[in-house]
Amino acid sequence: MSGLRESLEGKYTPTLLIALIALVPYILVTSASTLYQPDILKGVGISKSGATLASSFATAAYAFGALLCGDLVNRFRKHRLFPICGGIAAIGWALAALATGPAPYAIGTVLQGFGTGMLLVVALPPTIQNFSWKRVSLTAMFINIGLFGAVAAGPLLGGAIAALQGWRWLYGAFAVLAGGASLLSMVIIPDEEPPNPGLRFDWPALLLGLGATFLPFGGIAMVGAAGFGSPLVYLPLGVGLICFFALLLVEFHHDEPLAPVKKMWNTIPVIGTLVATIGGGVFVTLMELTIELDQKVGGEAPLKTGIMFWPQLASVLVAAVLLGALFKTRWLPVLVLIGMLSLCAGGGLLLTAKTPDHQTLLMVAVGLLGFGAGTTVSPGLFLAGMSLKSNVLGRIVALVELVRSVGDFIIAPVMVALSKSFSSGGSVDSGGIADSVLISVIVCAGTVILCCALYWGGRMGLPKPKIQQWLEEDGVALESPPLLARWR
């Protein structure tokens, strides 16, 4: 064991590898499971609404786990946190894989999300903070490939798993991967003292965060079964959103907040968070609407639907390479703008391809969507992070992921449910899907206009980020002016 530790401890490649192994499975499944969900319903005897609720609570647990670990990484050694968080995820995958009834499957699904959300904060920031600033472009590229490549590859994997009826084997493999990464972390993650073990526990943030995640996600999960007018939908959704805004307000005025809202209330972090949230939400929405169009309107087999999404994965890889190439240059904000416009263009093509027969247009559209996802969500997160000191990167990731999860996984279910409401005859049709796509494109275009206005209002040029200063000299990479500085 000591020899293995000497060869692996604190090394760049093993650290990045176990981070990606820990995070990719859950992210893959979030976009893959739609295509093999019928096999799950049959295999564990759970209703569609029950499976949707379990998935929504897993997303809530993912967001809350990230917020919670924003505190835990300050008071506990990452050397000990990683195997615990990875073990939680591994247990979740194993429970779901072996489940013969709804309860163990639902519990396992929630544990998958919770463990992965915690790992996001435990595993990801050290791959940036603990190594030379010269490697950060490569790290950004691989993070983009690993995380957003996984989202883009989800439909491909989901179609194949549906054809093979192999979801239990997939989840079993993910349990082994999570367990293996947890064991390896014990010899890879250095046993270092935590940065702030005496930090005051921020109970208001965690309690409000609990309500801001589980309540709205639970409400949204009931839309398909109960409809928008049901109190099972609007009561938890309304109270949850109140908790969400209360969390932001409380943390803004907190002297030592868990979520650094006040520090991020500047031009670049606000734009980065908006881009990551709306860009991610529009991408997930348009991807799910495309699956709806191909599956429920076109009646295509899951495997054929999954194969149609290969341009999405290819374009994410292109986006990741561009992110790595431009990360240290002044052109990163321009890449983000192009990414948002790419999402708008992809949605516009989906409006043109109103039926599944337009396969070429659909494939071009999903290619544009993949490029848009790869040049918005991760770059937006990095923009937010680079405008603050790197020692709070874990908290920034936790806050942005909380906000982004609310955007991604509330916008998409609402738009999918609306597509059914807009359709005639009680089942989803191409007209209803087109209406939801149009709303999504309008939201994306409005966000582009808002972000450009904020950028101009902040008197922002195209500054070159000072990456070495950010990672090695306790400074910031991008000086962020106050919001609307032009009029102050």
Image: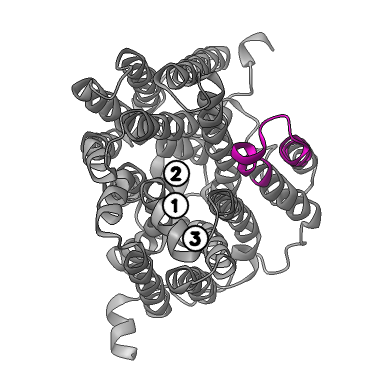
Secondary element at tag 1: helix
Q: Which residue is mark 1?
A: 472
Label 3: few (<14), some (14–19) or many (≥20) C-alpha neighbours in 10 Å:
many
Image-quadrant location for residue 235: top right
Circle 3 or circle 1, nearest the eye: 3
Instruction: Please give the label number shown on residue 469.
Output: 2
Label 2: few (<14), some (14–19) or many (≥20) C-alpha neighbours in 10 Å:
some
Q: Which residue is mark 3?
A: 116
Report the span colored magenta: 218-246
Q: Are marks 2 and 1 in contact (CB under 8 Å)?
A: yes
Mark nearer the N terminus (3 vs 2): 3
Residue 181: give x, y in percent of width and height.
Answer: 38, 72
Secondary element at tag 3: helix
Q: Residue at x 50, y 24 (%)?
A: 419
Mark nearer the N terminus (3 vs 1): 3
Q: Residue at x 50, y 20 (%)?
A: 423
The type of residue carrying mark 2 is: Gln
